[in-house]
């Protein structure tokens, strides 16, 4: 059962060398069950922190997070959260299939009672034939596929993705994004993706949450009404460009418009 | 391809050195204080009981001391990784232990505890404790920080985290420490035998040096080198069975 995600007025402060830093300020976000959401923002805006709070890795300083009516801690204890990190985070001593089985092992569920069969998932992510390979024998893209299979093996109510393909080249990334959409559609789960690519956010999501830099806030929420299944061809349509433009506009809303003689201005800004 | 060199390289090197030494001695390149390998071999062949009187007792004390050191270091490292404030004191105590000049303290210990097996075991353990401790302590924090996050999201118990993450991730560094410590255990035992024992390679060394029996001295030297290499090879062999993922080669990119 996919669950809705609601982030309600969440504030996060960190203690850093004695002083207090406000990382997230009054963040509000709503994503219906079974939908795909993308959080986009500049580096250091706290988007990964926000995703980690949804996964119960941190607790908000103030405010509340609600997943299908329950706090994240309960979902985590019920093994109902799937998380894909930026690095594959596979255990190098376990084979691909044993890495995919790890959540079952920890939850104490036998393979025959698994919510999803590890072998089926390996098939789904395109790693058939590599079940017995060690992670060190796979390319970065293949390792991340295994990590996605691992995140889905408990049939999670929410799938959280922290820039899952951020370390990969553009071509591999584009291909894996298309595949991720197929896998997500098949799984029927609610997905929340953190990214810093405008095109990726628009291509993947039903709803894009645009964050402002420090302290992080949800600046705007933009609905993406492109039909599904999404295809790479859509990325060159006017409607895609229009939504991209809207996201870009929201991201740079607070910056001074650049002068026509951009060279000098950009140079000055870089310092 | 990877198995053979790790096992045989120390042996092949030793054999090559022996051949070179034999040739050098016979052609008069070495002074009389260096014995030819064939003379050294004659020492053992002429008196086979020597093996049981020297090599066996030394190996016995060294192995027991080594295992005691490994057990103590693992226990200390476990405490250090479970109780954060204990980390620094345990490390510093290890540094202090390893900086004791055993050449000076060993004779005192022999007078204090006696020249029995327990003294030799204690010295062997003292000599090999620190490398194992460092390997274990660094090993227990060698897992990736995102792996720790993964185990949290998966709601793993502390015991599952230990068994499925912390211990496997520690093995490469732990074995590095075990391999470094292996020859130290042999040398520690010989040192203890120097200070007073009835049998062992250290005793043979003292006796042979006193009698200026050059081949016997070199027999003792060679035997202790081979023993150290053997204990190292044992640790390396166990490592290769346990730490298999390090040998991985990329199948496809």
Image (cartoon, coloured by chain):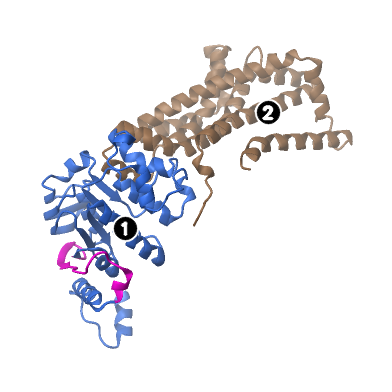
Choose between B214 and A174: the one closer to the eye: A174
Regarding residue B47, the answer to whether it shows in the image is: yes
Is the residue marked by circle 1 packed among few (<14), some (14-19), or many (20+) residues within 10 Å?
some
Query: Where does label 1 land, which residue?
Result: A180
Report, in whole angstroms, how far the alpha carbon at label 1 lies from the one at label 2: 57 Å
Label 2 marks which chain's residue? Answer: B
Is A263 placed left or right of A4 in the picture?
right
Q: Which chain is blue?
A: A
- Compared to residue A64, the image places residue B166 above or below, namely above
Query: Where does label 2 land, which residue?
Result: B226
Occupied quadrant, residue B111: top right
Choose between A16 and A44: the one closer to the eye: A44
Magenta range: A211-236
Q: Is residue A231 magenta?
A: yes
Residue B38: x and y in percent read 83, 27
Q: Which chain is brown?
A: B
- Compared to residue B1, the image places residue B85 above or below, namely above
Choose between A4 and B84: the one closer to the eye: A4
Q: Secondary structure at mark 2?
A: helix
């Amino acid at each position: 059962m996919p669950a809705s995600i609601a982030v309600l007025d969440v504030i996060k402060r960190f203690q850093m060398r004695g002083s207090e830093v406000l990382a997230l300020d009054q963040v509000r976000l709503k994503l219906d069950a079974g939908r795909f959401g993308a959080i986009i923002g500049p580096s250091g805006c706290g988007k990964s922190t926000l995703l980690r709070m949804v996964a119960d890795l941190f607790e908000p300083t103030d405010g509340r997070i609600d997943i299908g009516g329950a706090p994240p801690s309960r979902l985590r204890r019920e093994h109902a959260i799937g998380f894909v990190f930026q690095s594959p985070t596979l255990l190098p001593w376990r084979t691909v299939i044993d890495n995919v089985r790890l959540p079952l092992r920890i939850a104490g569920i036998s393979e025959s009672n698994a919510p999803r069969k590890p072998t089926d998932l390996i098939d789904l992510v395109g790693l058939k034939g590599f079940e017995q390979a060690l992670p060190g024998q796979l390319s970065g893209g293949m390792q991340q596929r295994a990590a996605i299979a691992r995140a889905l093996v408990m049939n999670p109510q929410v799938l959280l993705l922290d820039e899952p393909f951020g370390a990969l080249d553009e071509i591999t990334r584009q291909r894996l994004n298309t595949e991720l959409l197929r896998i997500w559609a098949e799984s029927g789960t609610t997905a929340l993706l953190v990214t810093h690519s405008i095109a990726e956010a628009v291509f993947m999501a039903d709803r894009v949450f645009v964050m402002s830099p420090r302290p992080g806030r949800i600046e705007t929420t933009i609905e993406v009404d492109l039909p599904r299944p999404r295809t790479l061809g859509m990325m060159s349509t006017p409607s895609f460009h229009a939504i991209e433009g809207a996201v870009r506009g929201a991201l740079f809303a607070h910056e001074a418009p650049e002068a026509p003689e951009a060279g000098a201005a950009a140079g000055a800004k870089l310092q | 391809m990877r198995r053979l060199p790790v096992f045989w390289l120390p042996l092949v090197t030793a054999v090559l050195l022996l051949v070179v030494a034999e040739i050098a001695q016979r052609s008069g390149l070495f002074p009389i204080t260096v014995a030819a390998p064939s003379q050294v071999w004659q020492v053992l062949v002429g008196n086979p009981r020597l093996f049981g009187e020297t090599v066996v007792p030394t190996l016995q004390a060294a192995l027991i001391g080594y295992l005691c050191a490994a057990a103590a270091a693992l226990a200390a490292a476990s405490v250090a990784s479970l109780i954060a404030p204990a980390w620094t004191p345990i490390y510093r105590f290890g540094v202090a232990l390893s900086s004791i000049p055993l050449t000076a303290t060993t004779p005192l210990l022999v007078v204090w505890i006696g020249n029995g097996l327990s003294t030799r075991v204690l010295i062997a353990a003292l000599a090999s404790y620190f490398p194992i401790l460092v390997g274990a302590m660094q090993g227990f924090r060698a897992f990736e920080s995102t792996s720790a996050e993964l185990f949290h999201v998966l709601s793993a118990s502390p015991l599952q985290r230990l068994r499925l993450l912390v211990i496997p991730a520690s093995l490469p560094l732990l074995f590095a420490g075990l391999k470094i410590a292996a020859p130290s255990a042999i040398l520690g035992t010989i040192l203890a035998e120097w200070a007073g024992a009835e049998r062992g390679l250290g005793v043979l060394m003292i006796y042979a040096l006193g009698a200026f029996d050059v081949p016997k001295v070199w027999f003792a030297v060679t035997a202790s080198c081979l023993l150290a290499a053997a204990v190292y090879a044992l640790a390396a062999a166990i490592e290769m069975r346990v730490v298999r993922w390090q040998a991985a080669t990329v199948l496809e990119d």
